[in-house]
Amino acid sequence: MNEMGYDAFAIAASAEEALACAQAKCPDVVLMDIRIKGPSDGVQAADMLRKKFSMSIIYLTSHADANTVHRAKSTDPHGYLVKPSSSRSSAACSKSCCIAALGSGLA
């Protein structure tokens, strides 16, 4: 992300870390993996981030089974990239998410 001009200021391993990082800097966009450490998974963490901070979420995960995708869709993400993802796909999805966030007044 840094190579594409984005400030990837934090990497969080758990929902609790993600919430603390978001509280500290309130990013416009969050790249979220589905499988993270702790009792909450990435879908639950993304839901918490959206509800508390109105952040745009892009899932970047290797999990694409129907149940996981259905759960993730319920959080209204701006993107769902399946790893491995090319940096080109990541950049395009991140850019469209930022545009959507700016257009809706979230950013």
Image: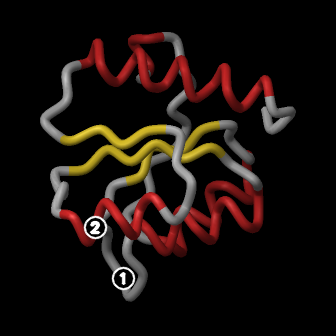
Q: Which residue is denoted by mark 1 in the rendering?
A: 38
Q: Residue at x 42, y 52 (%)?
A: 32
Amino acid carrying label 1: it is: Gly
Q: Which residue is denoted by mark 2 in the rendering?
A: 68
Residue 2 vertical position relative to residue 79 in the rendered view, above or below: above
Q: Residue at x 46, y 42 (%)?
A: 58
Mark 2 packing: few (<14 Cα in 10 Å), some, or many (20+)?
Answer: few
Amino acid carrying label 2: it is: Thr
Q: Is residue 93 left or right of residue 65?
A: right
- Where residue 43 sits, quadrant-wise, is bottom left
Whole-Å distance between the Cαs marked 1 and 2? 17 Å
Q: Which mark sits nearer the N-terminus, 1 or 2?
A: 1
As drawn, the label of residue 60 is none
Q: Which one is nearer the viewer's eye here, 30 or 70?
A: 70
Q: Secondary structure at mark 1?
A: loop
Residue 57 vertical position relative to residue 66 in the rendered view, above or below: above
Instruction: Report the quarter where the C terminus lies.
Output: top right
Q: Residue 104: x percent and y percent?
A: 81, 33
Q: Nearer the viewer, mark 1 or mark 2?
A: 2
Q: Residue 23: x percent and y percent?
A: 74, 59
Q: Secondary structure at mark 2?
A: helix
